[in-house]
Structures are given as structure tokens and as C-alpha cells.
Amino acid sequence: MKNAYFAAGCFWGVEQKFSRVPGVVRTAVGYMGGDWPQPTYEQVCRGETGHAEAVEVVYDPEVVGYDELLTFFWRMHNPTCLNFQGWDIGTQYRSVIFTRDAEQRRTAEQSREAEATSGCHAEPIVTEICSAARFWRAEEYHQQYLAKQ
């Protein structure tokens, strides 16, 4: 199994969408990209931590490739929105691909360039590509939140 990390707005919807991709073994929501240790949902929502609401995707590379996850990522949100998705506004809702190694970074950069030149977007893509830091798992009541409702 391999791990990938993405942020694309509210983590509830992002998690649900990734969980439906064949080859995705499990997902978890949490926080990544900030400098605040052990952040809480309330702190992240107030914009105090620098973290984005992120999703950890554990996948079987024999079934789905990282490049396919990236294609799915581009389609699930609007990568031209700076610090918001829909009604969710703030840096915690920014679009980010968190890469674990040089290969993921290279693939993510190539994918972003292909998406930028695809003609699918009227505005420039603002998605960040950052090295993955520690993933802080969100509180249990947030895990698979939409599936529980």
C-alpha cells in the first residue's frame, strides 16, 4: 500500500469522493501543512494553525496509480480558487497536493502542468505542491463524516 495526501476544500467531501475510487483501501481526514502541533478542528477552522483540511488516501498501486489519483483530484474541486471552495473560505480550504517523495513531486508537477494547459480552466491553477509533513488525524467524529450522516 502507498499513501497520498490532498487538500481540496472541506475534508468531508474530499474524503468521501476518494473513498469511492477503486483501489483506494482507506481514507482519513486530518490537518497538514501548518506549523501548529496537535491542532483541533476549532483551531484549524479559525485559521490559527496554517494547516489545511487534508485527506490521507491509502491506495493499492496495483489497482490505481498515483497519476490516476491526481486526475481524480483535479476533477473533484476547482483548483483555480485561492483559499476557498464553495462556501468554505480561508487558507484551511486551499488546494494542495502534499508529496511524500521526489517521484510523487515530479508526477504532481507534471500533472499540474498538464491540467493548466488542458483548456479546462478559464483562470490559472493555484494548487500548491508541498512536501508532506506530519499528518494530524482529525477527531474521530470527522472520520467518514458524510457516510455516518
Image (cartoon, grey):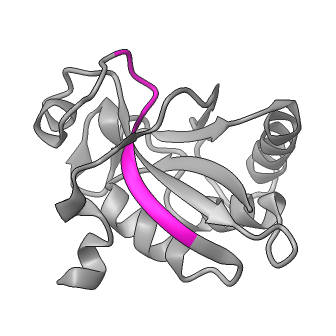
The span shown in magenta is 26-35
| Front residue (pair 15, 141) | 141
Instruction: Give the quarter of the figure containing the C terminus.
Output: bottom left
- What residue sits 27% from the left and 28% below the top? 38
**Residue 82, image x, y percentages:** 43, 35
| Front residue (pair 38, 44) | 38
Q: Is residue 20 left or right of residue 38?
A: right
Instruction: Give the quarter of the figure containing the N terminus.
Output: bottom right
In magenta segment, residue 34: yes
133 vs 115: above or below? above
- What residue sits 81% from the left and 49% below the top? 111
Principal secondary structure, stretch drawn in magenta? strand
101 vs 62: above or below? above
- The quadrant in which residue 65 appears is bottom right
- The quadrant in which residue 62 appears is bottom right
**Residue 118, image x, y percentages:** 80, 57
| Front residue (pair 78, 93) | 93
**Residue 128, image x, y percentages:** 59, 32
| Front residue (pair 142, 89) | 142
**Residue 106, image x, y percentages:** 87, 36
Q: Is residue 45 left or right of residue 131?
A: left
Q: Is residue 77 left or right of residue 108?
A: left
- The quadrant in which residue 72 appears is bottom right
In magenta segment, residue 69: no
How many badges with numbers are in the image?
Answer: 0
- What residue sits 11% from the left and 38% below the top? 42
